[in-house]
Amino acid sequence: MSAPFSFTLPSELSAKAPPERRGIARDRVRLMIIDRQTSHVEHSRFNQLGNFLRPGDLLVFNSSRTLPAALEGSEALRGTCMQVRLAEHLPDDAWLALLLCQQGEPFTCGLQIGMQIHFSPRLSAIVEGRDRNIPRLWKLRFSQSGTELINTLYYLGQPIRYEYVSAPWDLDYYQTVYAKEPGSAEMPSAGRAFTWKLLFELQRQGIQTAHIVLHTGLSSYMDDDLDAQHLASEEEYFISEATAAKIHQTHQAGGRIIAVGTTVVRALESAVDATGKVQAKHDYTRLRITEYHQLKAVEGLLTGLHEPEASHLDLLTAFLPANVIQSAYGEAVQQEYLWHEFGDLNLIV
């Protein structure tokens, strides 16, 4: 990771609760705007987003719905308790998952292929092996699949929660208002601040919308050394014919594609053909975007504020020079913006 992204983030700047539980509306979080042409930084509120967009712009949202992806289970033979965090749904209907001891450390106690994990009388899983790319992840095959498994997850599971979050907030707080297709291990949080009222206001302003689906994986493997390697999990995405056509039409008319979240950038840039046109596609992506990546599908980005040395900061360098990001983040710290999934937002256009 390049040195400019090693900055100090005071612990009090972690958003410990959803804005609604901090006494402000969902769409009243703060918004830092960075102009790609001038590097000018401006500070506003999210419900003023329309002031920084143009008629003819296209906002592309990730409509993946957050799963309650943390399950409490026990190893069948010895009864050892563990937490299972789902990371990725595989093409063969198995799942990759992170297995944690009750203390939050990666589970290593006699973990082996063939081990059975019990979650409830109705749900269990068999450990089928390790992931080749991310060795902390294990392949699990559940006793249920498809819609039946998703329904059971909603009955048994909890949202994945990190130590900076002050309480086990309900799953509804981890959903965007437009979320539809269940599958994300963690919330695609860049779109959390949107309300239906704001979406209708933007529509009246001539700003269009489209949706893709990318089911997000885990943001941390609870292992500092592994997290520092920024290993990209392979994430499943869907781009419909309608969305691909809308993106093409927007570009033809001179409008800008504004990705709502780094997940949308990764999906769209993964689906661009040799001519620079986004294709309708259902695939998996492990695309890592850095300053060396030439953006072909996306002109702007709405995103959260990212932690020091996070791989998402590398993605931002495809939009802006590293020193501009560093300077803007310095302002955000000084002005006490809030970080993480319940925090403030950054628009780069």
Image (cartoon, grey):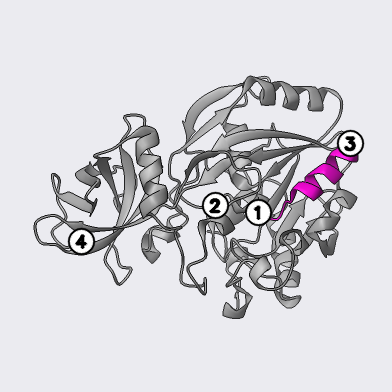
Instruction: Of the two numbered discs 3 and 1 on the same chain, state the one appearing first in sequence.
Output: 1
**Residue 255 at x, y = what percent?**
84, 32
Could you say which is closer to the camera, residue 10 or residue 188? 188
**Residue 335 at x, y = what percent?**
76, 75
- Single out the mark in the foreground, 1 or 4: 1
Determine whether label 2 and label 1 are within 8 Å by CB: yes
Could you say which is closer to the camera, residue 66 or residue 92? 66
Q: Residue at x 16, y 55 (%)?
A: 111
Q: Which residues are magenta?
A: 193-204
State yes or no: residue 36 in magenta: no
Left or right of 5 on screen, residue 329: right
Q: Amino acid at mark 3?
A: Gly
Numbered label attached to residue 187: 2
Instruction: Of the two numbered discs 2 and 1 on the same chain, state the one appearing first in sequence.
Output: 2
- Single out the mark in the foreground, 2 or 4: 2
Residue bearing mark 4: 108
Numbered label attached to residue 206: 3
Instruction: Of the two numbered discs 2 and 3 on the same chain, state the one appearing first in sequence.
Output: 2
Q: Amino acid at mark 1?
A: Arg
Q: CA distance from mark 2 to mark 1?
A: 8 Å
Numbered label attached to residue 149: none
Q: Residue at x 71, y 21 (%)?
A: 245
Determine whether label 2 and label 3 are within 8 Å by CB: no
Q: CA distance from mark 1 to mark 4?
A: 35 Å
